Image (cartoon, grey):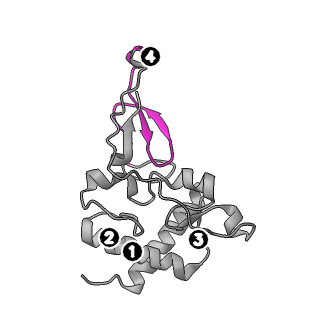
Amino acid sequence: MEKPTAEEIEKLYQKLKKDAQASGYYLNPDETFTKELIEGLLINEKRYGYQACPCRLAYEQKEKDLDIICPCDYRDPDLGDYDACYCGLYVSEKIVKNQKTLKSIPDRRPAEPVKVSGEKAQVQFSESLPFPVWRCKVCGYLCARGNPPEKCPICKVDKDRFEKYF
């Protein structure tokens, strides 16, 4: 497999940096480290057809790997608890401002893929809604409409990262 070019890495780096800043997130300030992670994302995209987290083993099936497509479903909880996501691509403002140091964190991903049904116990409530409610599994964005949006307006992930909430 051909390695990504420096141009491809730089292009994705600039896109991720811009998207992160627009959404209130921070990329790891260690540019060399960050670009190595981005190279891994690009390699996985060429290998699997999607940007699976380069620090986790992929099942090589998009349906099973939706939770680890960058930005992964675990990014926000990891940022809240550890000031960085599992691979260290996204970090908190404290890390950026050198108020905290980046440390290794545990992986939240379950050993087996978990299929979330999206059906909640609030069936009576959901029947009274004119539209289903969709939830972005990455950032938690909620919207009530016939179908999930093509892209999450908050974190920019594709519609396949939404679940029917109720």
Residue 54 in the image: above or below residue 110: below
Image depth: mark 4 or mark 1 in front? 1
- Dot 3 or dot 1: first in sequence order is 3
- One can see residue 154 in this view: yes
Q: Which mark is residue 28?
A: 3
Left or right of 32? Residue 71 is left
Q: Quadrant of residue 90?
A: bottom right
Q: Which mark is residue 40?
A: 1
Q: Which mark is residue 125?
A: 4
Q: Are marks 2 and 3 in contact (CB under 8 Å)?
A: no
In the image, what residue type sits under mark 1?
Answer: Gly
Q: Are marks 4 and 2 in contact (CB under 8 Å)?
A: no
The magenta segment: 124-150
Q: Residue at x 33, y 34 (%)?
A: 117
Q: CA distance from mark 2 to mark 1?
A: 6 Å
Q: CA distance from mark 4 to mark 2?
A: 41 Å
Q: Which residue is mark 2?
A: 44
Q: Quadrant of the C terminus?
A: top left
- One can see residue 24 in this view: no
Magenta-colored stretch includes residue 138: yes
Q: CA distance from mark 3 to mark 1?
A: 15 Å
The secondary structure type at the circle numbered 2 is helix
Q: Are marks 2 and 1 in contact (CB under 8 Å)?
A: yes
The secondary structure type at the circle numbered 1 is helix
